[in-house]
Amino acid sequence: MKALSHKLKLNKRGQTNWLPYDGTVNYYGNIFSDIIAKEYFDTLFNEIEWKNDEANMFGKRIITKRKVAWYGDKAFPYSYSNTTKYAISWTKELTEIKEIIERITQHQYNSCLLNLYHDGSEGMAYHSDDEKDLEKNGAIASVSFGATRKFCFKHKATKLRIDTVLTPGSLLVMKDETQTHWHHRLPPTKKVSEPRINLTFRKMVK
């Protein structure tokens, strides 16, 4: 089914649900200025403890070009793709961003998964953030720095697609039953040569 592309500009940022049913996605647009977004990008790029992501699939160990990092209030274990990561302590910048996001979204977060995409050739396949250790139907706040990238949702049953574009310094929040009924992905593209950093703040319950 052909994707629906959102081009509307919101008068009340973050109050419109971008999904037509079975979940809630609020897009706040750019919450950081271009200068602040660039400063955060540079600091995160150089100071975060990035590691190549790993996955065990079909009996094979796969190492991705994309790099990840896992931070939190304590050493939360986080398991996906048959691998487990343990959170390390917040940096000053991550704490600052978390507190800003919490004020805007009115949700509390105790962990953050960071992704570093070096260019448009690196992306993420359709998936849902529905691991059992995450708060069920809780809010996941996604903050983008660096390159502008397309972001897609696809309903698991109807296959309806919703496409949007995430700009540097922007905030998108997925909550309610979104992870139950929708997949999301970051599609690869040949049109982007710059790196992108994505922070997904979430709440671990186990």
Image: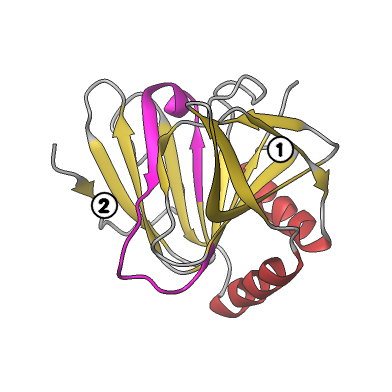
The percent coordinates of residue 171 (x first, y second) are 52, 54
The percent coordinates of residue 15 (x first, y second) are 44, 44
Taking the image as drawn, is residue 104 in sight?
no
Q: Position of 160 compared to 64: left or right?
A: left
| Count of numbered circles on the image | 2
Q: Residue at x 59, y 20 (%)?
A: 136
Alpha carbon distance from label 2 to label 1? 28 Å
Q: Quadrant of the C terminus?
A: top right
Q: Residue at x 39, y 64 (%)?
A: 120
Examine the rendered structure and indicate whether residue 144 appears above or below residue 139: below
Q: Which residue is mark 2?
A: 6
Examine the rendered structure and indicate whether residue 189 appears above or below residue 79: below
Q: Position of 9 compared to 180: left or right?
A: left
Q: Quadrant of the N terminus?
A: top left
Q: Residue at x 60, y 27 (%)?
A: 82
Q: Which residue is mark 1?
A: 108
User: 89 or 8, which is in the foreground?
Assistant: 89
Examine the rendered structure and indicate whether residue 127 appears above or below residue 16: above
- Circle number at residue 52: none
The percent coordinates of residue 112 (x first, y second) are 68, 45
Q: Residue at x 45, y 44 (%)?
A: 26
**In the rendered structure, which disc, 2 or 1, sits on the residue that comes first in sequence?**
2
Magenta residues?
172-196
Task: Indicate the secondary structure of the residue bearing disc 1.
Answer: loop
Q: Residues within 10 Å of mark 1 (few under 14, many from 20)?
A: some
Does residue 128 belong to the magenta stretch?
Answer: no
Q: Which image quadrant for residue 155?
A: top left
User: 141 or 1, which is in the foreground?
Assistant: 1
Q: What kind of residue is marked 2? A: His
